Image: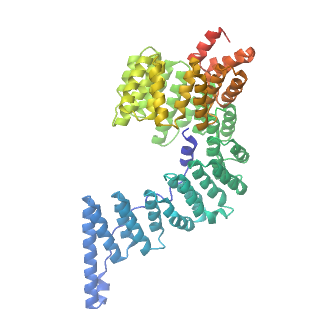
Amino acid sequence: MVSKLRNFRLALMSALVLGTLPTLAQEAPSLDSTTSEALPPSAADTAAALSAELFYDLLVGEMSASQGDAVNAVALLMEAARQSHSQQLYQRAAELALQSRSGQRALMVADEWQKNFPQSREANRFMLQVLLMLNRVSESQDALSREVAWTPAAAKPATYLSIAQLYSRASDKALAAAVVEQALQPDLKNASLAPAAWATIGHLRIAANQKDLALQALKHAYAQGPRSGATALLALELMESGVSSAEPMVQEYMQHQPAPTIQMAYARVLMAQNRLDNALEQLTRLLKGKPDMPDAWMALASLHAQQANWKKAQEALQRLESLVEKMPALAQRTQALTQAYMLGGRISLQQKDYAQALNWLEKIPSGIDTLNVQSLKAQALAKLGKLAQGRALIRAVPADSEEQEVQKRQAEVILLRDNDAPQEAYLLQRTLYEQLPDDANIAYETAILAERAGKIDVMEKILREIIQKHPDHHHAFNALGYSYAERNIRLPEAKELIETALQQAPNDPFILDSLAWVEFRMGNKDRALALLEKAYALRNDVEIAAHLGEVLWSTGNQERARSVWHQALIQDADNETLRTTLERLQVKP
């Protein structure tokens, strides 16, 4: 999953300590008249000549820069910097070197600047920035160690977060984590700094897919700061990545005046894990202390919608709207209202109140998040029998690039797919596949739509091509195996395919559901039931519920089967898998 938490956490950062260097004044050094008169004639002449030469270098250098000649511009400014021993001129040369997108030129400037001003923090930061830009991570440790050492203690937590962001972009993420851990060694011995420093290392270990080392970092952070927000954020990220043993540390933090933003993050992780009752408990507690927090009301409205509690969802949405309208900043208010109106549109679509969905969406000013807004409007129109009008809305969205054209076509495919037009959806998706044959995700969607359009051979051919080209694409393994299980053919091969997918994505509830289904087809009902119970506990999904109900029914537990199906019908009575299951078994829950 896309790591929502990571995005949420980075959004909480202070201004980057290691960001782009500011532009400083660029006045050429000059000697005043009193100084010139006091010098002997030869010295005065030399100073005047030096001043004139500097002025010439600066003038021609800036002219070269304005004409796009970065090579001469940097060379002339470097010469002026050497003559004047001016850090400002080194910095100007460094900026031009970066703007020219020549990493080697920027590194040459950084090296000379740092040698001439070894105690300059600006020079050190620039050197660090250039080394990371060139992906020379192992060479950046000295510069990083100096930056950490020169940072005042009060500013270090913000610096750690900036370091995590900078080093997470490295291609060798394990090396990046190791370099940062080495640079932070002095701070790991400081009781007040250790929790945040260990948390920084832990975030980078997760980025490197070294969850065991990340968990070790969390334990160190927790040992020295069990109530630290940095510790809690690392534990939340580990929770999100599937490390359930991190949750007790989050819960410990939540017992002692948690920061509202971190409490909000915890609720979001719980919602993503489909632990809606636990998420509701956190949101209720949060809103009791912070009743005017728009993000919490937004999450609460979404949570109630997932539980099909439409009345409470609408009430939360109305409270959200009233809070957002009071925001003083126009841009912030517009963005928040747009999110609220889009959520209102989605909730109304789930309620099948398509006219109300359009009412919500019409409140959004034109030009904001256009494709998403028009796609939701198109869905409402299609449900009202106006599919062609909905397609026209999507097609009318302007596109400034090939990527945006692809996004428009994908939105139209989804509209057709979700509104009983599988043939048209497949044909349109096929054009994307032919345009971008090496895109594994587009190929996968094409295969799934081919199956819906009744083109089973095409589906199987594309999925096998994906598996061959992208052996780590677990969705393709799962889809092919499930297709065999659903048709009750080639069951040993189906099981092997699905188990391969599960190895790549352990505890994925949909893959567990597929494996359960093939076990059920093979007559292993107890094994199928255990897998489905686990999948259903991980995600309360309608299709998983349909399968769980059928296995329960076949084992004689008809009362529980009816209960599971009844809850699924409340969520989505139109789900095809659920509907066909109940019709085939002739059951009315």
Colour scheme: rainbow
Looking at the picture, tell me which residue is in the foreground, 174 or 283. 174
Specify the quadrant that holds the N terminus.
top right
Quarter location, residue 91: bottom left
Q: Quick check: 6 above or below 571?
A: below
Tell me which corner region of the image, top left, top right, bottom left or bottom right, holds residue 365: top left
Side of 356 where 192 appears, left or right: right
Is residue 307 shown above or below 76?
Answer: above
Task: Write the residue at 61% across / 49% down.
Answer: 210
224 and 356: which one is in front? Answer: 224
Instruction: Farthest residue to the top: give it.
Output: 586
- The answer to whether residue 309 of the structure is visible from this angle is no
Quick check: 427 left or right of 556? left
Q: Where is residue 104 in the image (x, y as percent from the top left)?
A: 37, 62
Percent position of residue 410, x then y: 42, 28
Towards the viewer: 393 or 209: 209
Q: Is residue 396 above or below residue 80?
A: above
Q: Give how far across and how far down residue 481 sits, in percent.
A: 56, 26
Q: Where is residue 514 in the image (x, y as percent from the top left)?
A: 61, 26
Task: Please say whether residue 20 is visible from this viewpoint.
Answer: yes
Farthest bottom residue in view: 40
* Above or below 50: residue 409: above
Image quadrant occupied by the C terminus? top right
